[in-house]
């Protein structure tokens, strides 16, 4: 029973692989071209790779291997062009493939030239991203706003302060942002002017006897009543 189950799984896997290959015939032609390349048949490999490229393939491996064919045939300039094109497609990622695995059997000076093209493409892509970010930052600074989620928010100009809440115990009929006038006692009272021809009234000085804090005059005691007096 277990063997039968494994057989079914294997058949399904093979069917899925065949279906995946059938979905993109260009991949099949590319695979055959690679096979011819490693066999040393560069003429057949180049013809098949040209066919795949003419069909509009976005697979970077196709350009890498055609560049390797050109390099093996002594066409260094054509090889460099294909290496650069393949590196650009790899960065663009229109078709995601395992480039490293496809090139693991490629060694020597041709692999070195290919890797130079890939490195140059990565650096160029990074520089382009930095330039875009710099341009976006400069535009933000010129507009005087702040970036929020990729959008430039303009500054708030002419926004009036919101009125105080009606339940605010400090509501005085004013709005936020307005100065509060400070009343100085006596500063705003009008000066009192006496009528013409009259003398301004002054406070009367109370008599000494009426002074509640005055010192009473000492009483005079008759000599005859003085118990300590000296008789005549």
Image: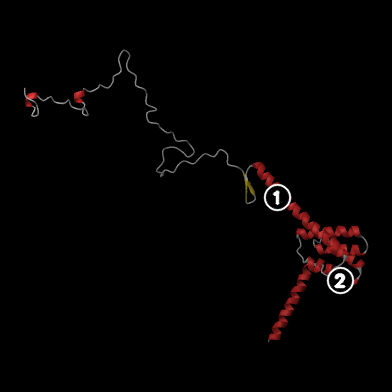
The percent position of residue 2, horizontal first and vertical second, equals 68, 85
Does residue 120 show up? Answer: yes
Q: CA distance from mark 2 to mark 1?
A: 44 Å
Marks 2 and 1: CB-CB under 8 Å?
Answer: no
Q: Residue at x 78, y 70 (%)?
A: 21
Which residue occupies the foreground of this view, 206 or 103? 206
**To which quarter of the image does residue 122 belong?**
bottom right
Which color mode does the image show? secondary structure
- Which type of secondary structure does the marked residue at label 2 adopt? helix
Q: Residue at x 9, y 24 (%)?
A: 223
Q: Is residue 154 left or right of residue 196?
A: right
Q: Which label was assigned to residue 133?
A: 1
The percent position of residue 46, horizontal first and vertical second, equals 89, 65
Does residue 63 show up? Answer: no
Q: Residue at x 71, y 85 (%)?
A: 3
How crowded is the residue under tag 2: few (<14 C-alpha within 10 Å), some, or many (20+)? Answer: some
Which residue occupies the foreground of this view, 35 or 134? 134
- Earlier sequence position, callout 2 versus callout 1: 2
Q: Is residue 110 left or right of residue 95?
A: right
Residue placed under numbered mark 2 in the picture? 35
């Amino acid at each position: 029973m277990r063997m039968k189950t494994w057989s079914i799984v294997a058949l399904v896997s093979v069917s899925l692989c065949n279906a995946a290959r059938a979905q993109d015939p260009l991949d099949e032609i590319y695979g055959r071209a690679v096979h011819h390349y490693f066999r040393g048949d560069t003429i057949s490999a180049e013809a098949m790779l040209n066919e795949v490229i003419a069909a509009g393939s976005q697979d970077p491996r196709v350009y890498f291997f055609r560049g390797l064919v050109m390099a093996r045939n002594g066409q260094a300039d054509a090889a460099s062009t294909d290496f650069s094109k393949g590196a650009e497609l790899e960065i663009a990622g229109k078709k995601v493939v395992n480039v490293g695995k496809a090139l693991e059997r490629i060694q020597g000076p041709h692999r070195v030239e290919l890797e130079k093209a890939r490195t140059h493409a990565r650096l160029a892509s990074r520089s382009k991203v930095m330039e875009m970010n710099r341009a976006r930052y400069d535009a933000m600074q010129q507009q005087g706003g702040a970036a929020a989620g990729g959008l430039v928010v303009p500054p708030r100009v002419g926004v009036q302060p919101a009125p105080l809440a009606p339940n605010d115990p400090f509501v005085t009929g004013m709005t936020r942002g307005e100065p509060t006038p400070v009343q100085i006692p006596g500063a705003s009272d009008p000066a009192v002017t006496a009528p013409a021809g009259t003398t301004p009234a002054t406070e009367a000085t109370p008599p000494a006897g009426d002074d509640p804090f005055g010192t009473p005059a000492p009483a005079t005691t008759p000599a005859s009543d003085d118990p300590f007096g000296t008789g005549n």
